[in-house]
Image (cartoon, rainbow, N blue to C red):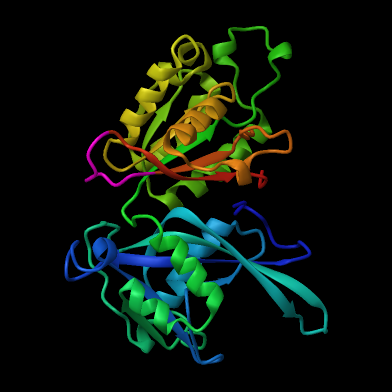
């Protein structure tokens, strides 16, 4: 998926989520022991997944989180992408446009942000925008599938149930734009971000918390550290040095670098890893090859694994309670064209 578009394009952009929580019955009751939230829209008298149009200048992930909050009253932490649906819409002046809605898996959390809090269903007067939504209903996925009005929503729900809900997330970032190597006379390790690079770092600072970022790791390069330092400050955490994930540290022994990344993925929370363009494509390709994940839809025009400066790979791994090291289940790429 390419979920970082902005408004002002020929198509209408929107975003939504399959919002899930642990079911009251526990992990053995229904697939993954989860429930998903459906919303009833009185204007259309339908049951759908929470979704809505992007505001001006808003990214798709930010819109997904905002729309979930507005339609359910709950905070969401985004996970893997679930693809998109597209259909024709008519504007007030009679124009015909395409509307694209990008979807994510999204874990519902309590007001205090703790994952273990069990959000309760909301009555109509507790939902933020009662003109659009008058009821939120939590259901097991199989019951939600029967209640959903639109086939496109059922396909998105199917993409959600195809993999476990409790995936582990690792956010793999390429450092933002730095000055040209040929114009830098000092130690290349110390080459800093440009003005555009700082804008990209600021955009990532806003984007990464939407996916629950909680720990920060960086290759030992100033440009890598500068890309994520403000995020680490926001989270009040130290940046962990990762020499095996720099270009010089990775290529003498790629399996060791890959093992280090998997060790980071196996840790608690949602780690952010800031690395380099000479490392990320090979890491992602090896993870996908070893796990059988199809990257073809995400490859660039030359058939390579993309890694633009300031871009993000959202890597989803097997749940923490599965035995063995983490195994890649899904990958999403954010080309980061918003800086």
Judge from the rendering whether residue 242 lies leftward or rightward of residue 174; answer left or right: left
Give whichever of 115, 85 is nearer the camera. Answer: 85
Judge from the rendering whether residue 205 lies leftward or rightward of residue 325; answer left or right: right
Instruction: Tell whether position 16 is magenta.
Output: no
Q: Position of residue 62 (x, y in %)?
A: 53, 58
Task: Please indicate, yes or no, whether residue 240 appears anywhere in the rendered image.
Answer: no
Give whichever of 287, 249 is nearer the camera. Answer: 287
Task: Please indicate, yes or no, whether residue 82 appears anywhere in the rendered image.
Answer: yes
Judge from the rendering whether residue 57 lies leftward or rightward of residue 319; answer left or right: right
**For residue 260, which quarter of the picture?**
top left
Q: Position of residue 185 (x, y in %)?
A: 67, 7
Give whichever of 182, 316 is nearer the camera. Answer: 316
For the point 48% across and 26% down, the residue is 225
| Count of labels in the image | 0
User: Quick check: 131 above or below 16?
Assistant: below
**Quarter of the picture holding the C terminus:** top right
| Region rendered in magenta | 317-324
Q: Position of residue 151 (x, y in %)?
A: 54, 77
For the point 34% across and 55% down, the residue is 164
Q: Tell me the chief SS of the magenta region.
A: loop
Q: Position of residue 280 (x, y in %)?
A: 53, 28
Give whichever of 71, 194 is nearer the camera. Answer: 71
For the point 22% across and 39% down, the residue is 323
């Amino acid at each position: 998926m390419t979920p970082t578009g902005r408004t002002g394009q020929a198509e209408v952009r929107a975003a939504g989520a399959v919002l899930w929580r642990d079911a009251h019955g526990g992990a053995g009751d229904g697939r993954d022991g989860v429930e998903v939230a459906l919303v009833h829209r009185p204007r259309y008298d339908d049951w759908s997944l929470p979704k809505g149009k992007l505001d001006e200048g808003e990214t798709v992930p930010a819109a997904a989180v905002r729309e979930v909050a507005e339609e359910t009253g709950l905070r969401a932490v985004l996970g893997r992408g679930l693809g998109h649906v597209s259909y024709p819409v008519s504007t007030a002046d009679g124009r015909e446009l395409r509307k694209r809605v990008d979807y994510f898996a999204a874990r519902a959390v309590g007001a205090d942000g703790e994952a273990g809090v069990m959000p309760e269903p909301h009555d109509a007067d507790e939902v933020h925008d009662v003109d659009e939504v008058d009821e939120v209903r939590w259901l097991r996925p199989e019951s939600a599938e029967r209640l959903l009005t639109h086939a496109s929503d059922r396909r998105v729900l199917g993409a959600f149930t195809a993999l476990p809900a409790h995936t582990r997330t690792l956010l793999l970032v390429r450092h933002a734009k730095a000055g040209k190597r040929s114009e830098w006379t000092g130690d290349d390790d110390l080459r800093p971000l440009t003005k555009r690079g700082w804008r990209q770092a600021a955009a990532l600072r806003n984007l990464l918390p939407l996916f629950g970022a909680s720990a920060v790791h960086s290759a030992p390069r100033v440009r890598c550290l500068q890309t994520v330092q403000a995020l680490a400050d926001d989270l009040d955490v130290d940046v962990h040095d990762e020499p095996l994930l720099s270009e010089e540290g990775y290529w003498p022994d790629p399996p060791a670098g890959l093992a280090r990344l998997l060790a980071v993925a196996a840790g608690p929370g949602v780690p952010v890893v800031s690395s380099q363009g000479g490392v990320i494509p090979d890491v992602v390709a090896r993870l996908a090859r070893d796990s059988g994940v199809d990257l073809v839809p995400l490859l660039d025009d030359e058939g390579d694994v993309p890694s633009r400066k300031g871009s993000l790979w959202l890597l989803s791994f097997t749940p923490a309670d599965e035995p063995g090291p983490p195994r890649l289940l899904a990958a999403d790429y954010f080309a980061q064209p918003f800086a």
